[in-house]
Amino acid sequence: MDAWNATLLEHGVNLGALEATFHELNSLAFLEPYWQAMLDNYSEFVIVSVFTFILHEALYFGLWIPYLLLDYIPYMAKYKIQAAKPNNWTDTSRCLKGLLFNHVFIQLPMILCSDYGLRLLGFSAAMPLPKATTIAWQCLVSFILEDFYFYWIHRFLHWKKIYKYVHKVHHEYAAPFGIAAEYAHPIETMFLGIGTFLGPLLLTRHLLTLWVWLAVRLYETVDDHSGYELPFALSAYIPFWGGPVHHDFHHEKFDGNYSSVFTVWDWVFGTDKAFRAAQEEKRAKGSSQWSDFFDKVFGRRTPKAKTA
């Protein structure tokens, strides 16, 4: 070890300093003064409820704006997944009206009422802050839990006997765009929203972790509904990540690809057969680059499709 340290020092690398920097960043010490100032100046109700709602709105609409701008850049049209169905302001404005109703009359009351329930379950905004590595692994597990829950609830909502009463609202946009992610029937908003809180409720009791998780989850869902397959899409770098192409197909065909994040459950239960066949056909024509872990390992073979 001493020889290794000496070699690093010869190249100008101080391992001890790097380790100290990592521990300092991991402890989130740089954030503590600002977090403490928030605790000193606002009640826990305001922090847990009001600030969470404000954060949600800022992130949701803020993450959508870059995709909105893409609609007005001709060069980016080549990345539009459903190129024959360009976004238009008529659909966008109608979606905005529905969203504002849902956010103000459904999500806001739910978040305001959650303060008591979260405190009852032991949630807190108090110091000390969780470590960055703790937040990271808890967000990963939250993705896994949410994805499994979402798959089955989403698939249930496509059951023909109830589809037209609830989930049909979300499918009003066959070619989705960013803010259509939360455009849904109030019942769907409530039931699918449960999945978002599963990870934080089971794994953590700190508000900061919930806020970070909310940020990454909102990015994922806005990106999935963006309607664009960009060169730096996460599906190209993260195994099992579905991404916009995977979810866009669900909106276009109204069936299959029920998972919210990963491709695992759709592959396991055979609800992605039509999607993979379509991608194989596009690849043969040179019009798609989408592939995932199962394509690469199993030679683009999928299980026999099962009906929903």
Image (tube, rainbow, N blue to C red):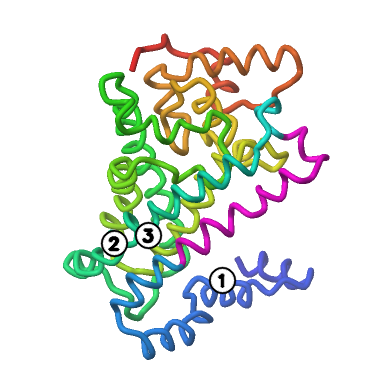
- Chief secondary structure of the magenta portion: helix
Task: Please tell me whether mark 2 sits on a helix, a strand or a loop.
Answer: helix
3D distance between C-alphas at marks 2 and 1: 40 Å
Give the quadrant of the C terminus: top left
Quarter location, residue 203: bottom left
N-terminal of the pair, mark 2 or mark 1, is 1
Q: Of the residues shown, which amino acid type is indicated by label 1?
A: Phe
- Residue drawn at the location 60% of the way across and 37% of the way down: 235
211 left or right of 25 in image: left
> Crowding near pointer 2: few (<14 within 10 Å), some, many (20+)?
few
N-terminal of the pair, mark 2 or mark 3, is 3
N-terminal of the pair, mark 1 or mark 3, is 1
Task: Please identify, in this view, whether the residue under mark 2 or under mark 1 is nearer the observer.
Answer: 2
77 left or right of 222 in image: right
- Residue drawn at the location 42% of the way across and 9% of the way down: 304
Please tell me the numbered disc located at residue 104: 3
124 left or right of 117 in image: right
Q: Give the range drawn in magenta.
A: 55-79
Q: Is 78 in the magenta? A: yes
Residue 255, percent from left and from top: 44, 21
Compared to residue 274, the image places residue 39 above or below, namely below
Residue 245, percent from left and from top: 59, 30
Task: Please tell me whether mark 1 sits on a helix, a strand or a loop.
Answer: helix
In the rendered image, the residue lying farthest to the left is 120
Give the quadrant of the N terminus: bottom right
Q: Mark 1 points at which residue?
A: 22
